[in-house]
Image (spheres, coloured by chain):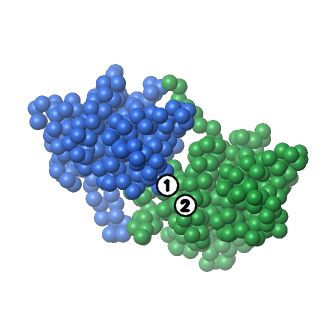
Chain colours: A green, B blue
Amino acid sequence: MAEKTMKRVLEVRGLTKVYGDACPDCERLTGPESGVNQCPRCGSIVACSDVSLTLDQGEILGIVGESGSGKSTLVRCLYFDEAATGGEVYMPEDEAGTLNLLTVSSQKKRHIRNHLMGMVYQNPLMGIKPHFTAGGNVAEKLLTAEIYHFGDIRARAAELLERTEIPRARMDDFPSRFSGGMQQRVQIAKALANNPPLLFLDEVTTGLDVSVQARVLDLIKEIQQELKVAMIAVSHDMGVIRMLADRTCVMKNGRMVEMGLTDQIMEDPQHFYTQLLVHSMV
Amino acid sequence: MLAEQEILSIRGLRKEFTLHMLGGKVIVGCDDVNFSLKQGEFMAIVGPSGAGKSSIVKCLYRTYLPTFGQIWYRRADGTVLDLATASEQQIVQLRQTEMAYVSQFLKVIPRISALDTLASGLRQRGVEMATARRQAGDFLAMMNIDEALWDAYPSTFSGGEQQRINVARALIIRPRLLLLDEPTASLDAETKRVVLQALLTLKSQGTTIVGIFHDTESVKRLADRCFTMQAGRCKSVSKTREVV
């Protein structure tokens, strides 16, 4: 049997995001050893520093860490919501696979985001427009991906909403009238509309009731298995990560302190902070 | 690295745990572990609790990161990989294609039926849904799981039933390398007989097995050789009949 080589979807090298002017000592004076991410010399915030990772087709990479560890900044930089200060990002899927996506034009970034990426935020209202109907929200994403045929859009919206368990009868209703869990599922439907090979999930189940959380997690797992979408899932909840992720990266004060198989992170954590995190699980 | 016909070779394996929260205290799980297996061989690991048996098996599956030593493994495509240092993505791929592990306790995704829990391993390997579910049903029947439970969630099952699901989930995918951590500990006599028979069948089909057992009956029926451990180290390696 020939070795099955997985398609590489994303490659990140040395991604860094600093808020502020940054001084030559920022790197040295922040991080898990000093326990801060604000540079005591110049006051800049080192939100994430020198993060490198790869992601293959159909794989879910978990990112865990406490509030302020830089995990959300990382995915926001990858989704171009925030401009990274430094580093390289490649998506071999794209025809321009050899280009560092952090340095391409904003038009090109928009194109990549609309065609190759999806994002699900913790707050559904960041990803969907409450005054557009559920179907209209999905349609919006399809329009940005240059699909203009009304019938096709309508059919695709119906299919996605059905898959995320939004009743067909609510398709033309406004998400502002939906529960939090339903809004989150509309957001997932919208994120999947352009059939992206890469999906970012930023604390998608935080704040949901446990039963609703369970259904959202089931949906994500299903999407991974059936559509082979690669995902980066950010969560401060180790239980969520344990259920979703094959590999997990642990962040602290803007640095990646450990990367490993999820079961290894849980049962044989290497870094001081990971041990603290695992032993703090209730 | 590996002699001809060998599929697995462990050399000088040591596992240390550094407990940072206890001031960097070091606990040794196992040390200086050496053994090799040919394809289709069954090695039983025996010894008292705390002797380091699980450490070896978990290092092989890479739930534990080995501290020193090599674990050479010949993959289905003939290439040899050191499991101790292989990338996480290589390990994920092996777990999805040819390596399986049965732990002492069932770990499943909640809200997935017993039937689909078994079928998912086959689905992952590209088997059609209908075929996967039919084979899953065959395995559940073989493991004497009442048909009324097939669409129920394994997390709600009794201990023995859970363990049967656990074993069936590994057997159904016919792994090339199977790692067992007391798979028969909580089974009744009849189910234990079924599991041992299934393991023998798998072995005869070429699966290489490393398994931790406490009962001599299982060891006697299954294992070619016995790796006896004491205080983290190898006490003896011998042919099974010499031990039992």
User: Could you tell me residue B124's position as x and y percent?
Assistant: 53, 38
**At 55% across and 36% down in the image, what residue appears?**
B129
Chain to which mark 2 belongs: A
Placement of the C terminus of chain A among the 4 image quadrants: bottom left
- Disc 1: which residue: B111
Q: Nearer the viewer, residue A7 or B110?
A: B110
- Disc 2: which residue: A214
User: Could you tell me residue A155's position as x and y percent?
Assistant: 80, 47
Seen as rendered, the residue at the extreme top is B4
Chain to which mark 1 belongs: B
Identify the element where label 2 is drawn: helix
Residue A36, placed above or below residue B151: below
Residues marked 2 and 1, same chain: no
Q: CA distance from mark 2 to mark 1?
A: 8 Å
Residue B159, placed above or below residue B88: below
Q: Is residue A31 visible?
A: no
Q: Is residue A159 visible?
A: yes
Disc 2 residue type (three-letter) = Ala
Identify the element where label 1 is drawn: loop
Q: Quadrant of residue A179?
A: bottom right
**At 59% across and 48% down in the image, what residue appears?**
A222
Tell me whether the residue at label 2 lies in contact with that at label 1, contact meaning CB atoms closer than 8 angstroms.
Answer: yes
